[in-house]
Amino acid sequence: MSKMAENPQISVIIPAYNGSLYIRPAIASVLHQTYRDWELIVVDDGSTDNTRQIVQQYEDKLRYLYQENQGVAAARNRGILEAKGELIAFLDQDDFFCLTSWRYRWLGFKNTPVSELSIVFGGLSINKVKPFPIYNRGRAYPN
């Protein structure tokens, strides 16, 4: 946790349940982002495999939270409650962000008046007035 931002712009939340086969690439894709003002929270929703041991290998780079199994929605909600960031990003345990994902998404938020912005997702920003693409030509870091 010492290398994470104290007051991050973005809180990335990964809900996990028995995700030992998939969670490393998800974590790595956050750690390798070109945009650095984030925190990473992994909420383990009662895993019975070795998810905890894998996630704890990154203990200085993320916050690991464990809870009894309550389902993915409860795990996301727990992450939101613990988040310090102004913005929330969800990442599933078996997914990953491209290298420049958050740099371009943050530009979408920063360069659009709040009154016109609804949501930013993937490689596209949806604007209340008119949609405009934010092209993401980044590389993925699956390991």
Image: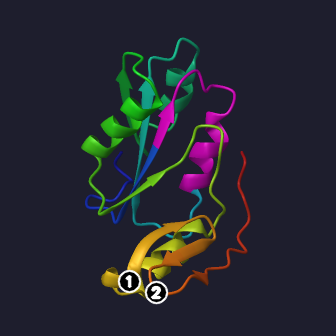
The type of residue carrying mark 1 is Glu
Looking at the picture, the colour scheme in use is rainbow
The x, y position of residue 21, in whole percent, is: 69, 27
124 or 110, which is in the foreground? 124
Q: In this view, does 125 lie to the left or right of 113?
A: right
Report the span colored magenta: 14-31
**Total labels drawn:** 2
74 or 41, which is in the foreground? 74
- Of all residues shown, which one is farthest toward the top? 48
Q: In this view, does 64 lie to the left or right of 57?
A: left
The x, y position of residue 26, in whole percent, is: 61, 44
**For marks 2 and 1 on the same chain, the one whose residue lies earlier in the sequence:** 1
Query: Is disc 2 in contact with disc 1, using a CB cutoff of under 8 Å?
Result: yes
Q: Residue at x 36, y 45 (%)?
A: 1
Please name the residue that numbered disc 1 is placed on.
116
Residue 129: which numbered mark, if any? 2
